[in-house]
Image: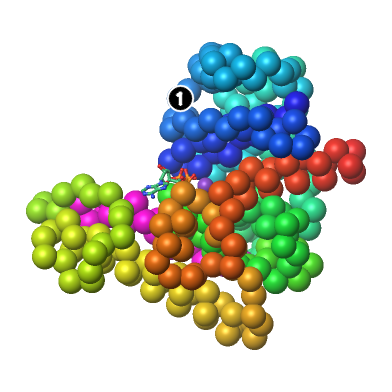
Amino acid sequence: MLLAIDCGNTNTVFAIWDGDTFLATWRTSTEWQRTADQYYVWLTTLMRLQNVDVSIDAVIISSTVPRVVFNLRVLADRYFNCRPLVVGKPDCALPVPPRVDIGTQVGPDRLVNTAGAYHRHGGNLIVVDFGTATTFDVVETDGAYVGGVIAPGVNLSLEALHNAAAALPHVDITKPQSVVGTNTVACMQSGVFWGYIGLVREICARIKAERGSDMSVIATGGLAALFQQTETLFDAFEDDLTMHGLTVIHRHNKEIA
Ligand SMILES: Nc1ncnc2c1ncn2[C@@H]1O[C@H](COP(=O)(O)OP(=O)(O)OP(=O)(O)O)[C@@H](O)[C@H]1O
Ligand SMILES: CC(C)(CO)[C@@H](O)C(=O)NCCC(=O)O
Ligand SMILES: [K+]
């Protein structure tokens, strides 16, 4: 059984893959201080609660936070007796290598999203992931990651307003009733919500124009659904795209081993 770990700057998601489906998915906040023992207690408690009675014999990790990888490696080694595949490390092969400027360390989550989206949709895609940052990944017709766009995440944008301006409260994103806000919270939500609709539309249009091609736009990440409700920005929305990509990369490495 495969344990797939997607570690973002805000949250870390663990999923158990039986080769066919995900048996369970669990989320925790990302904290680099968390030890292998702490992960193991947390994980086995949830497994027991949900009657997931399986033995894990393989682990794959994608981490945008380099510091957490050490303890996740210890988790795999000490408790599951295996050497984990770590996306972005030389011993983890990708189905198609990225084509970017020399020396660029592409975020592993973007490489994973690329592999997952290409496996499901073929090439010529824009993958949009609404995480801590909002990333746009351009996937070539052959499945290579060839670049993209990094924008401040939705929650990060709202936090930035709160942190920088004494009179602006902490607010959560939601679809505002109107564009013109009649109170502070509504004004902030409008700025980020409608601003984001514009950001996504404009960036996708410009990528397509720059490449002279009508690409499919695939969205993932918790907040994608909120935007898609209002405007058809995406051709598909897939909640499990990153996890799916991890299973694709794991299978690829087994096949070439
Ligand atoms: N409708 C919604 N309104 C507000 N927040 C939402 C909504 N749906 C999902 N979320 C939040 O969006 C986040 C989505 O998680 P996702 O894994 O996409 O990114 P993240 O965990 O915030 O970032 P990272 O992966 O970079 O750590 C979660 O924190 C979830 O609570
Ligand atoms: C942009 C984030 C933070 C999104 O999670 C991550 O993919 C990352 O740290 N990327 C490194 C830089 C790059 O992808 O070009
Ligand atoms: K993510």
Q: Residue at x 21, y 47 (%)?
A: 170
Residue 44 at least partly seen: no
Q: Residue at x 28, y 49 (%)?
A: 172
Q: Position of residue 135 (x, y in %)?
A: 51, 60
Label 1 packing within 10 angstroms: few (<14), some (14-19), many (20+): few
Residue 201 at least partly seen: yes
Q: Position of residue 94 (x, y in %)?
A: 77, 50
Q: Is residue 207 above or below residue 78?
A: below
Query: In this view of the protein, which residue sits in the foreground, 185 or 96?
Result: 185
Q: Is residue 255 above or below residue 70?
A: below
Magenta stretch: includes residue 138: no
Relative to 56, 204 lies left or right: left
Q: Position of residue 167 (x, y in %)?
A: 9, 53
Q: Which residue is mark 1?
A: 33
Q: In the rendered view of the protein, which quadrant contains the N terminus?
A: top right
Q: Is mark 1 within 8 Å of ligand 1?
A: no
Query: In this view of the protein, which residue sits in the foreground, 164 or 15?
Result: 15
Q: Position of residue 134 (x, y in %)?
A: 46, 58
Q: Quadrant of residue 62?
A: top right
Q: Residue at x 16, y 49 (%)?
A: 169
Please state the total of marks drawn on the protein image. Answer: 1
Coloring basis for residues: rainbow
Q: Which residues are magenta?
A: 146-162
Q: Residue at x 23, y 69 (%)?
A: 178
Relative to 101, 248 lies left or right: right
Element under disc 1: loop
Q: In the rendered view of the protein, which quadrant contains the C terminus?
A: top right
Kind of residue at badge 1: Gln
Q: Is residue 41 above or below residue 22?
A: above
Q: Quadrant of residue 43?
A: top right
Q: Quadrant of residue 211?
A: bottom right
